[in-house]
Image (cartoon, rainbow, N blue to C red):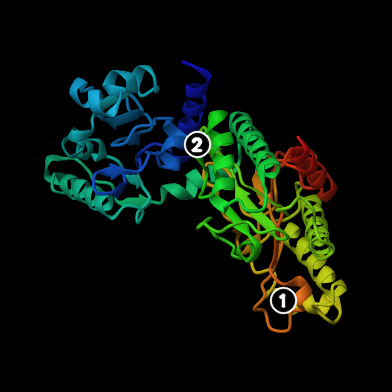
Amino acid sequence: MNSDQKEYQRRRKRLMDLMNTGAIAILPSAPVRVRNRDVEYPYRPDSDFYYLTGFPEPEAVAVLIPDRPQGEYVLFCRERDPQREQWDGYRAGLEGACEIYGADDAFPFDDLDDILPGLLENRERIFYTMGMDAAFDQRVVKWLNLVRERVRTGVTAPAEFVSLQHYLHEMRLYKSAAEIKLMRQAASISAGAHERAMRACQPGMTEYQLEAELTHEFMRHGARAPAYPSIVGGGANGCILHYIENSATLADGDLVLIDAGCEYGCYASDITRTFPINGHYSDAQREVYNIVLEAQAAAIKKVKPGNHWNDPHEAAVKVLTKGLVELGILEGKVTELVKQQAYSPYYMHRTGHWLGMDVHDVGDYKVDSQWRLLEPGMVMTVEPGLYLKADIPGLPRRWHNIGIRIEDDVLVTKDGHEVITAAAPKDPDAIESLMAAAQAA
């Protein structure tokens, strides 16, 4: 068994230890999605399913049964089919499910309805997350009812449903060494893509042409897809938080905000950089930029074990509010303005989120109604911003349509933190020098 499969095996064992005997877990992978007519989206497995199996194919269901004599890990998947593989690509088949992906036992996906009810017999609890796939929910309930109909034969039916994600998402929140290695690689590729975009950027380009530079850099380093639709917003578009049209022309004198990261090995990166399209920050742009940069530094400083999740946000908000007062956009005492959330027209989102297999990764932010304490192995983004839209009442023209966000991916370590996306330039002088060198070449 290779090191990757040992990692998945450890995860399954840990989950089954939490389940205890008398339980069964059912995890379907994501279905294939149709893009249009007979064209499908490129397939990407469900994150929870992949976290436990590493199995990349559609039409698959993992079943975990602690202490089952015939094997605790059962995988339902597609059988080998040379004719279909001629059209759609190779399949692992039942043999590959066991030999390559570590299943103890494997059955055809088409036999789910015949075999799974029998696996439910004499189990006390079903670990399954309801509400993610209505059609599959109905199948699970149907299987349960079939077992209930057999009680006169001496079998017992499970009497309890337990949400699988409660346990699994807590596991996913703490990244292993293998996961951190993949996330560092995703971060490195994405940092290089942002630097490439800075070098390529010129007035007159379209936003999608700059997006193409990112995509090229992702793919040439083995990241076949972005972790989320890339945001490339020039000028006023940089003030739209989830702008993904990327269709406008980049104008001389404007900033461009790029929020983009690749997915590598099913792990996401998430970086935002904001830089001048012509390679030179105006005085107004630099003033706002430096405030956001200072806010990010204050927030990152708060990322360490023992601090709570909201500490970085509180630190960023304080710096941003103080900066808005210094710019003359807000008036009053900083502490009172923070309390009143007077910054909210200019900064309306949180300072970060968990990061992992999903860009907005799983894991509770509060435990027992209290902000969660940060612990080693957690990975989060730190991404303060200021969005000075021209239509904000009373905003002086000098600041119109300056939208700035600076985002990095931060690993909580035993002694503090590691910014795993630090290679992406963010010092304004360094960015200007980089762009100037590229234009001179």
Identify the mark nearer the N-term, 2 or 1. Answer: 2
Within 10 Å of disc 1 (Cα), the crowding (few <14, some 14-19, many 20+) is some
- Tell which of 257 and 106 is nearer to you: 257
Question: Foreground residue, 289 or 97?
Answer: 289
Disc 2 residue crowd, few under 14, some 14–19, many 20+, Cα 10 Å:
many
Near-viewer residue (303 or 263):
263
Horizontal arrangement in the rendering, residue 118 relative to residue 438 (left or right): left
Asked whether residue 433 is in view, the answer is: yes
Quarter of the image holding residue 16? top left
Residue 131 is marked as none
Which element is circle 1 on?
loop
Residue 156 location, quadrant: top left
Q: Quadrant of the C terminus?
A: top right
- The circle on residue 266 is 2
**Circle 1: residue type:** Gln
Q: Amino acid at mark 2?
A: Cys
The spot of residue 214 in percent (x, y) is 58, 41
Alpha carbon distance from label 2 to label 1: 37 Å
In the image, taking residue 300 as reference, residue 200 lies left or right, namely: left
As displayed, is residue 46 above or below residue 14?
Answer: below
Residue 430 image point, x, y percent = 82, 44
In the rendered image, which residue does mark 1 sit on? 341
Is any part of residue 268 visible from this angle?
Answer: no
